[in-house]
Image (spheres, helix red, strand yellow):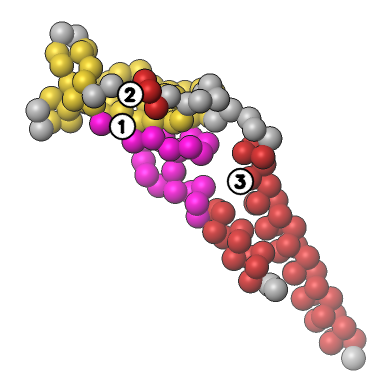
Amino acid sequence: MGSQRKSRMDTHTRCSLTSILSGILCLYFLLPSLLCENLLCYYSPIHIIGEGDPPQATATECFPNERCCQAEGYYGEHRALLKRGCMAEEDREDTMSFMGTQYTMNYTCCDWEFCNSCSGIAARLHVIGALVAAVVTFGNL
């Protein structure tokens, strides 16, 4: 009898902790957008690919009408430039002159915290975390 009661208490405690954890995860991912805070992104100045290590990216806060972007500059078929930061839709340029050379620019923009990281894995952590929180929350129903 005591063993069954303890087992039910352990299950109840485990479910409670799971619910608390899923609630914390949901707040972590959703609260910034609910509070209407400005988007946080990585910023790094223009870097010529192949010339030394890229500069260290720093965190920056975007203006309300801006999104996180990563821009790549192409010289012909060769990827030559890389930069990251905040950008408004209307500020994107198809071509850019840098050190006397014209580059064709390609932009990848997104609208969640630090989504313009250098690797796609870090950008996808936001989505993975939200999915895990949803499964944990709604899987117990």
Magenta residues, start to end: 106-128
Where residue 49 sits, quadrant-wise, is top left
Identify which residue, 56 or 72, lies in the foreground.
72
Where residue 7 sits, quadrant-wise, is bottom right
* Mark number, residue 29: 3
Q: Does the magenta stretch include residue 47?
A: no
Q: Where is residue 14 shown, x and y percent of the image?
A: 75, 69
Which of the two labelled residues, at mark 3 and mark 1, occupies the earlier sequence position?
Answer: 3
Is the residue under label 1 in contact with that under label 2 (CB below 8 Å)? yes
11 with respect to 129 (left or right): right
Q: Where is residue 4 shown, x and y percent of the image?
A: 84, 87
Q: Distance between the residues labelled 2 and 1?
A: 8 Å
Which of the two labelled residues, at mark 2 and mark 3, occupies the earlier sequence position?
Answer: 3
Residue at the top extreme? 100
Above or below, 35 against 92 in this view is below
| Label 2 packing within 10 angstroms: few (<14), some (14-19), many (20+) | some
* Mark number, residue 107: 1
The local secondary structure at tag 1 comes to: strand
| Label 3 packing within 10 angstroms: few (<14), some (14-19), many (20+) | some
Residue linked to disc 2: 92
Q: How far apart are marks 3 and 1 (CA)?
A: 25 Å
Q: Distance between the residues labelled 2 and 3?
A: 28 Å
Q: Give the residue type at disc 1.
A: Tyr
